[in-house]
Image (tube, rainbow, N blue to C red):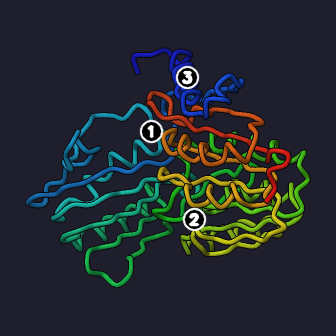
Amino acid sequence: MHLSLEAQARAHIEHVRAALPAEWRGAAIDSHCAPAAVAYRSRARVHVTSERGTPSVGMHASRTHLPVDVEACAVLAPGLENARRMVARLVEGSRGRGDVQLALGVDRLPVFDFRWAGDFAAACFARLDQAVARRQIAGARVTSEGASRPAVVGDPTPWLEGADGLPLRGVSGGFAQASDLTSAMLARHVAELVRPWHADKAVELYAGAGNFSVLLAREVGELVMVESNREACEAARMNLAARGIEGRVVEADGDSFVWSPMTRLAVIDPPRDGARAAALRLASSRVAHVVYVSCDTQTLQRDLQILAPAYELRSVATFEMFPQTSHIETVVALERRRGKRP
């Protein structure tokens, strides 16, 4: 946070440039600034420890699993900051430790996903019920150690405005981009990239609940969405159905999914571990176009080294998804080299 936003963007660009294969490092890199530099996060996770029923809530201290309490978090959206402040009161009386995913749900009210190891006090459920009744929160899901299924209070479903301007259903405790506004910018950019290619068949790996899919399905002849999380697959189907859009959602591991030999476009947005296995298969495939979305430059560098012999670089763009941090979202568009079809 000691750097100006312009200096942060320059540092991120050079960090991404260093991650590109040597022959691509002279390429232009488009930088997309964030709509807001603070109070932008619409998703967060905090850690909780509670000894003798007195909770401590925060992020992990360096090299420990102990949370550090803070008075305020500058990057959380106001609704999420209010939610963060509520956690200690909601879990008071419990013993043990856990993680809490914070998001925004119906009517932009906070939603919580608790993962708890230890004794989650019965009084906490009463507090959650009261918070829902008073419209302080939309809902919560609590997964306690040893329980066969989560306990649900109210409606813990996260909701955001999709890149098409329509409500997009998320998954309680599931993955979503840090900022709703920048996520929409990112999805629109990906859709603009693929539009000129007129792909008859496309596959989207690690598709989640369909943030990209609701636009991609309009730009290609046939879209197959691959996602390993069952709840995310269900949410993706609902998001497509709500828009009257066709697309096939497959519950499978993006690393090992075998796409049709006729597939001409692959859009991949892997977790921080990257997509090494998918990159190896793409390099030896007949897929003509690849759009790789990455939140981790180290795994991006590794996977681009695999793809570079088979593909040419078409564009690189960065999105300031995480202002005030060292992290950056990157979108790389590739086109198969001539004479490199298997």
Secondary element under disc 3, as helix, strand or loop, is helix
Q: Are marks 3 and 2 in contact (CB under 8 Å)?
A: no
Indicate which label's residue lies in the foreground, 2 or 1: 2
Indicate which label's residue lies in the foreground, 1 or 3: 3
Q: Quadrant of residue 80?
A: top left
Q: In the image, is 337 to the left or to the right of 72?
A: right
Could you say which is closer to the camera, residue 202 or residue 96?
202
From the image, tell me which residue sits under label 3: 14
From the image, tell me which residue sits under label 1: 76
Q: Amino acid at mark 3?
A: Glu
Q: Is residue 305 above or below residue 133?
A: above
Q: Position of residue 103 (x, y in %)?
A: 48, 53
Q: Is residue 67 visible?
A: yes
From the image, tell me which residue sits under label 2: 255
Q: In the image, is 69 to the left or to the right of 249?
A: left
Which residue is painted at 33% across and 50% down in the image? 46
Q: Amino acid at mark 2?
A: Asp
Q: Amino acid at mark 1?
A: Leu
Say which label, 1 or 3, has the lower sequence index: 3
Could you say which is closer to the camera, residue 217 or residue 199?
199
Q: Position of residue 117 (x, y in %)?
A: 23, 68
Say which label, 2 or 1, has the lower sequence index: 1
Q: Residues within 10 Å of mark 1 (few under 14, many from 20)?
A: many
Q: In the image, is 151 to the left or to the right of 34?
A: left
Q: Quadrant of residue 277?
A: bottom right
Q: Is residue 136 above or below residue 35?
A: below
